[in-house]
Image (cartoon, rainbow, N blue to C red):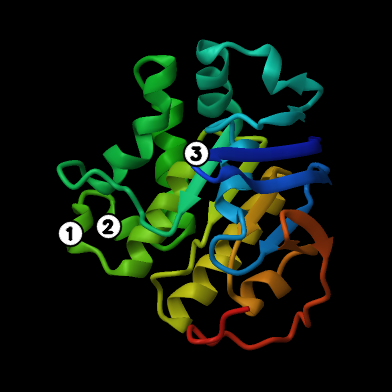
Amino acid sequence: MLVAEDVCKSYSTPSGPLVVLEDVNLIVKPGQSVAIMGPSGSGKSTLLNILGALDRPTSGRVSLEGVDYAHLDDKGLAKLRNQQLGFLFQEHHLLPQCTVLENVLIPFLAFGRPSPADVARAKALLERVGLADRMNHFPGELSGGERQRAALVRALVVRPKVLLADEPTGNLDAESASQVVRLMLDLQKELGSILVVVTHSPYVAGCMGQVFELRRGTLVQKEIRSDTSFDPNVRL
């Protein structure tokens, strides 16, 4: 279970503290999916970074399976990110000098050299997302949708307890975006992972089990029709 309790985040500015998050509370259980919406600059990515142990809150606490992030040092946080958390961003962040398969195997380097079982799992997932014939290609030889599917496999290959996605369809056309969302949800459900997605898209949000909006630094539950069609020009 991923829990955020009374999370606040502020930054010092010449004119005084800039409050980005204020008393944010969120509980997400294994197998659940959550969308976080809000205008640009509302703090969505900041919250995702805190949930992903990439940033620390000014006050409040975040825990995963009862482990309080505040009790972990930098080494412990790095281990948490490598073993328990998966990240998917708007940009794929694939290494251009590595093949698709080599990119997908990168998370296993945190544990040492990838085992034959690790390689087999990576190949199976790439086949699952339709990239069986692209494993030995380089990212520059792939379409935008193919690169994002490869990045999704890399995020899930170590079976993380939480998948955190920041605008995962932001650079994709409607067809590619729909495909990535469907695969992301299917794989998340198969793993029983927690999924937290930051998005401007009402289509992506409508595919999630719960939808929240950041308003003045606080999370408010929001209703989105699940039958909303995907339009890359529609933003909420």
Q: Which residue is mark 1?
A: 140
Q: Earlier in the sequence, mark 3 or mark 1?
A: 1
Mark 2 neighbour density, 10 Å: few (under 14) some (14–19) many (20 or more):
some
- Quarter of the image where one finds residue 206: bottom right
Q: CA distance from mark 2 to mark 1?
A: 11 Å
Q: Quadrant of the N terminus?
A: top right
Give me the disc on residue 157. Answer: 3
Q: CA distance from mark 2 to mark 3?
A: 17 Å
Answer yes or no: is residue 159 visible. Answer: no
Q: Earlier in the sequence, mark 2 or mark 1?
A: 2
Residue under the image location 68 percent in, 50 percent down: 195
Q: Which residue is mark 2?
A: 134
Task: Give the vertical position of 144 relative to 131 (above or below).
Answer: below
The amino acid beneath tag 3 is Val
- Which residue reaches farthest left? 97
> Helix, strand or loop at disc 2?
helix
The amino acid beneath tag 1 is Gly
Give me the disc on residue 149. Answer: none
